[in-house]
């Protein structure tokens, strides 16, 4: 595995492989099995896989979250090496932001109007800025994104289309712990009791979805019911439980089996903001 510590090392590496298909997995490090499933998908379908590890300052709307973002670089590199990834890119700030860390301006339309887009001002602009910069520098054929961050996946898919980029965005299913909780780097920051409480979020949602009795209710009533169930746990405070159209990401006003619909949830657990989502139909 080649470790690329700046843009000129990346350029040198990239120049050797024109004519090969390149798969790219952008990450912020503190890697776990969720990240590794993206890497494995890339390795299955491309000649070469490159992973980036970069904690992108412009996508953090909360300075404390940026400051406390876990850093496990040494073990990340070891695990990627064991997976036989071809290259890891650890960019410098000036590789990505030669003129300083400022986001590009985007029009995400309806995709960023609700949920994380509404609550984390500037987050998606920062994310789309760094990802499009990576695409420009790496020129990957395929890039792999987790459904765990469904709104991010939808936004980057749209940006690629709007910018006319050649990279194909490949979605990858959410990898979960044994109790069903979605793996996330931020889970490392949860205390034991918080982690136990957090495991109930997915159980409450899944249990409710499996009963299907929501078809006789409304999204508004169902959101209120689920938010109340989650709030029973001491360490959980609900930011939102939203039912949205899986394509436009706009909240729905009635359940229609003919409309692709997902449930999206954001919950504060101690200092950590947890998000998850599930399909309804
Ligand atoms: P992050 O390091 O949090 O920026 O995530 C990097 C990529 O890994 C993003 O495309 C995430 O959606 C994806 N990812 C994070 N957690 C999971 C998970 N539990 N399952 C699948 N993909 C994930």
Image (cartoon, helix red, strand yellow):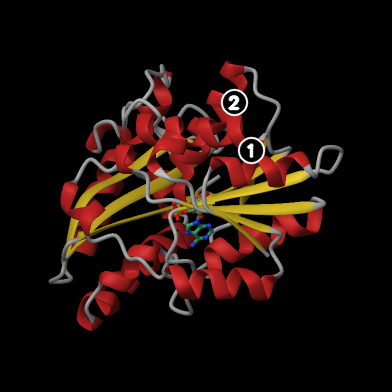
From where the camera sits, is residue 255 visible?
no
Q: Is label 1's Cβ within 8 Å of ligand 1?
A: no
Mark 1: few, some, or many residues within 10 Å (few <14, many ≥20)? some
Query: Front-most of 73 and 6?
Result: 6
Q: Is label 2's Cβ within 8 Å of ligand 1?
A: no
Q: Residue furthest right?
A: 19
Nearer the observer, disc 1 or disc 2? 1
Q: Residue furthest bottom?
A: 192
**Residue 281 placed where, x, y %?**
55, 44
The residue identified by callout 1 is 138
From where the camera sits, is residue 81 visible?
yes
User: Residue visible at 26% across and 32% down?
Assistant: 118
User: Residue visible at 25% across and 73% down?
Assistant: 190
201 vs 250: above or below:
below
Q: Viewed as shown, does residue 73 lie left or right of 217?
A: right
Q: What kind of element bears circle 2?
A: helix
**Residue 176 placed where, x, y %?**
50, 69
Mark 2: few, some, or many residues within 10 Å (few <14, many ≥20)? some
268 vs 160: above or below:
below
Q: Cα distance, mark 1 to mark 2?
A: 14 Å
**Residue 240 placed where, x, y %?**
25, 46
The residue identified by callout 2 is 160
**Residue 191 placed where, x, y %?**
22, 78
Mark nearer the N terminus (1 vs 2): 1
Q: Viewed as shown, does residue 204 lie left or right of 256?
A: left
Q: Residue furthest left?
A: 234
259 vs 29: above or below:
above
Q: Viewed as shown, does residue 265 lie left or right of 34?
A: left
Query: Front-most of 30 and 195?
Result: 30
Image marks 1 and 2: residues in contact by CB distance under 8 Å: no
Q: What kind of element bears circle 1?
A: helix
User: Residue visible at 38% across and 22% down?
Assistant: 104
């Amino acid at each position: 595995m080649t470790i690329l510590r700046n843009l000129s090392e990346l350029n040198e590496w990239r120049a050797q492989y024109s004519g090969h298909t390149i798969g790219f997995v952008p990450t912020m490090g503190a890697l776990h099995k969720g990240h590794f499933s993206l890497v494995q998908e890339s390795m299955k379908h491309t000649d070469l896989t490159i992973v980036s590890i970069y904690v992108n300052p412009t996508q953090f709307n909360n300075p404390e979250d940026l400051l406390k973002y876990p850093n496990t670089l040494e073990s990340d590199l070891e695990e990627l090496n064991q997976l036989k990834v071809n290259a890891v890119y650890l960019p410098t700030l000036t590789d990505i932001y030669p003129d300083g860390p400022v986001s590009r301006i985007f029009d995400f339309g309806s995709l960023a109007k609700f949920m994380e887009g509404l609550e984390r001002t500037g987050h998606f602009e920062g994310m789309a800025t760094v990802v499009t910069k990576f695409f420009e520098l790496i020129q990957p054929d395929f890039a792999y994104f987790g459904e765990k961050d469904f709104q991010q996946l939808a936004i980057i898919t749209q940006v690629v289309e709007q910018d006319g980029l050649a990279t194909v965005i490949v979605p990858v299913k959410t990898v979960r712990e044994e109790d069903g909780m979605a793996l996330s780097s931020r889970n490392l920051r949860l205390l034991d009791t918080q982690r136990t409480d957090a495991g109930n979020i997915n159980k409450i949602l899944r249990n409710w979805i499996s009963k299907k009795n929501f078809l006789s209710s409304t999204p508004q009533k169902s959101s209120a019911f689920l938010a109340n169930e989650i709030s029973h746990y001491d360490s959980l405070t609900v930011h939102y439980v939203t039912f949205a159209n899986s394509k436009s990401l706009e909240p729905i006003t009635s359940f229609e089996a003919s409309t692709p619909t997902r449930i999206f949830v954001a919950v504060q657990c101690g200092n950590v903001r947890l998000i998850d989502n599930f399909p309804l139909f």
